[in-house]
Amino acid sequence: MKYITFTIPCYNSQDYMRHCIDNIVAAGEEVEVIIVNDGSKDDTGKIADEYEKKYPTIVKAIQKENGGHGSGVMAGIHNANGMFFKVVDSDDWIETKDILDMLSLIKKHEEEKANIDLYITNYVYEHAADNTQFVMHYRKCLPAEQIFTWEKMKRVKLETVFLMHSLMYRTSKLRESKMELPNHTFYVDDIYAYQPLPFMKKVFYHDIDLYHYFIGRADQSINYKTMCQRYEQQMRVFKIMFTAYTYDEIYKQPYHLRKYMIKWLMTICGITYMTIVGVKDDKETRWKTFKQYFKELKQIDRKLYNKIRHRSLAAFAFAVPGYNLKSFASRKVYGTYQKKLKLG
């Protein structure tokens, strides 16, 4: 029995992927590790094959053409045999002892026929620059160490939204959501942490610092300048999220879940706005793109558009005069969040 499938999307990861993989395979035969080599140009593919040969009953190596992080995750979903599914980026890690802890918990729940659909755990920002940590936990918004439904969730603050790092979905439910992540697109994590949620009926928040998220590379996708350069990809992600559910479908969800889904949409809407106007370069094209983009969203679902557009930073965008002022304000807003979490 494979209780957890860990999928590790890799691109040019030869210098750091071993640490990630070694920690997981050490958990033994009850886990499955899918290493997806996404068309790397270094020795990533060879290392993946090496692990498959060394651990044939645990590791599966997938060699594919480059398609981006989302395509790597989707390859894992399509090939997973584990009861639960977890994505681990190749420069991040999970401690072996914590994997064993999760396995013990899952087996206990399976013996009790608890039918958990989603495990939520804490994650840790690991800052390479000063060797410090910032733990993201959910103690104020979720009941810990008990099975619950979304009605038991409390108000989730902006800084404690669910991210890919905190989620372990039941594989069958994840597939049932029919989520498709686009190729060659950053920020697909936001889709992953949104679209499957209505399919997860029973939830368990395990208050453990499971996932360690490495912060330290200048080219990381959360770097603000990098995000602004990739604003069209951020727009693509938000549009997929916006169209995943209609306004009416969202409002059929349990109260606390629909409140959360709306808040998450507003958050990504605001981030999308900031990436578009966050730099002064090519401002005419960017502002024209911004206005056309929201015009299209309005045509798709006017009710959802009105709910999101007028209660996010996008409303601020239309209200503040002058592109330069919008750009300045967006940098300040993101800078505050960036400073708190030391995201670079």
Image (cartoon, rainbow, N blue to C red):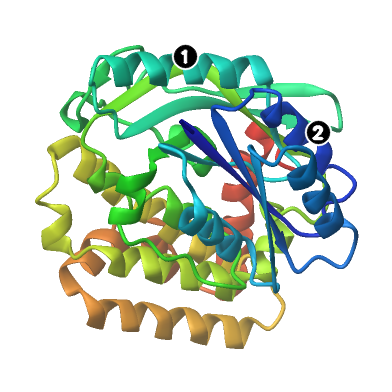
Q: Quadrant of residue 319?
A: bottom left
Q: In this rendering, is residue 104 above or below 70?
A: above
Q: Tag 2: residue type?
A: His
Q: Nearer the viewer, residue 156 or 35?
A: 35
Q: Residue at x 48, y 54 (%)?
A: 77
- Residue 330 location (% of width, % of height): 57, 57
Identify the image quadrant of the C terminus.
top right
Separation of residues labelled 2 and 1 (CA atoms): 23 Å
- Residue 251 location (% of width, % of height): 12, 52
Frontmost of labels 2 and 1 is: 1
Side of 128 where 243 appears, left or right: left
Q: Tag 1: residue type?
A: Ser
User: Of callouts 2 and 1, which one flags the residue occurring earlier in the amino acid sequence?
Assistant: 2
Q: Nearer the viewer, residue 5 or 133?
A: 5
Q: Residue at x 59, y 87 (%)?
A: 285
- Residue 323 showing in the rendered view: yes
Q: Residue at x 65, y 33 (%)?
A: 341
Identify the residue position indicated by label 1 in the image. Answer: 104
The kind of secondary structure element at disc 2 is: helix
The kind of secondary structure element at disc 1 is: helix
- Residue 139 showing in the rendered view: no
Q: Residue at x 47, y 66 (%)?
A: 237
Mark number, residue 19:
2
Q: Nearer the viewer, residue 228 or 85?
A: 85
Mark number, residue 140:
none
Q: Quadrant of residue 219?
A: bottom right
